[in-house]
Image: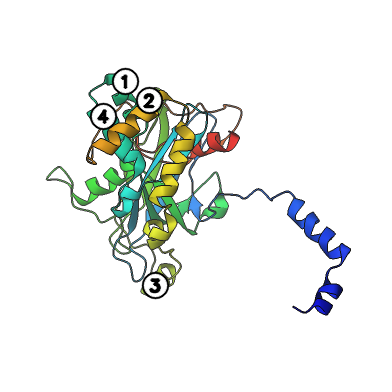
Amino acid sequence: MSLATLKKSNSLDKLLGAVQVENKPLEKKSYIDERIWKPVMDKTGNGFAIIRFLPAPDGEDLPWAKVWNHAFQGPTGQWYIENSLTTIGQNDPVSEMNSAYWNSGVESDKEIARKQKRKLQYFANILVVKDSANPSNEGKVMLYRFGKKIFDKCMEAMQPAFEDESPLNPFDFWEGADFKLKLRKVEGYWNYDKSEFDSPSPIKDNDDDIEALWKTQYSLKEFTESTNFKTYDELKTRLGTVLAGTTSVGNAVNIMEDSPSVTVTVDTKEEPAPTVNESQVTAFSEGSNEEDDTMSYFEKLADKG
């Protein structure tokens, strides 16, 4: 840039305009994925919908994506809600810390590991067959986030335990079946035991309509692409922020540095379902019993924090 150009471009209005842009309040971003379908609970604490699981999208191998995450509140009051790198076969700082806590042999450390354990989510394409709470969803292909309870229902259909039951592939266009999702709250926990598959039937009357439906499905690869996960260092920094100021953190870090990484399976009690306001109809993200029922609940609490 020449001095003459600088002389012409160095205007007061330009500088003031730049300051106004920089000082403009940032627009709050929405983290709601409009592609994801969520069943709705009524005022009595029950929910009902009919969905149809869809096969793998074109060019992909599996009809579901499996993601591990952590969701817990630290002593600072801040929340740690992050996907776990163990999903893509990499070391994760929370899993390493939990291993250190568990291997310490101290019961209080084990309790911390239990509270910070991994939670499991699945993502799949579905056709919304019936959604009385939101009829506009009916007939749409959407993504469904669910947990181990529902996934086990699918596995039980594919591998029935009794000889009088025929195997069913829930993810098949022609020989699959509608899934009647029945949700209720039992002793404070979300319960899906009454959910069941209907009789097998083609999803559409002809293959042309089936192919058109297939082409509208969402890719599931994005959920396990490395670009959608924070790096180990980024997660470790966030973890330090959430847990900062506690003496146990320093102890755990020391143990982590001196011990090999160990994968630990910890059995825990279920987390109670969040209380439903009886004056409202509450949408929720379905998950498994203790695995990830409360993922959306955690997210809401984190937003409030």
Q: Disc 4 marks which amino acid?
A: Trp
Q: From mark 4 to mark 2, how far is it between C-alphas?
A: 13 Å
Q: Helix or strand or loop: what does disc 1 sit on?
A: helix
Q: Quadrant of the N terminus?
A: bottom right
Q: Earlier in the sequence, mark 2 or mark 3?
A: 3
Q: Earlier in the sequence, mark 1 or mark 4?
A: 4
- Image check: 201 left or right of 40? left
Q: Disc 2 marks which amino acid?
A: Ser
Q: From mark 1 to mark 2, how far is it between C-alphas?
A: 10 Å
Pick the residue in front: 61 or 24.
24
The reply to whether dot 2 and dot 3 touch (C-beta < 8 Å) is: no
Pick the residue in front: 240 or 199.
240
Q: Position of residue 110 (x, y in %)?
A: 29, 25
Would you name the residue on which mark 1 appears?
Answer: 108
Q: Helix or strand or loop: what does disc 4 sit on?
A: helix
Q: Position of residue 141 (x, y in %)?
A: 46, 60
**Residue lying at 81% horizontally and 77% vertically, measured from the top left:** 3
**Toward which corner of the image does residue 205 lie, by quadrant?**
bottom left
Would you name the residue on which mark 2 appears?
Answer: 248
**Residue lying at 57% horizontally and 27% vertically, measured from the top left:** 277
Q: Helix or strand or loop: what does disc 2 sit on?
A: helix
Mark 1: give few (<14), some (14-19) or many (20+) Cα within 10 Å.
few
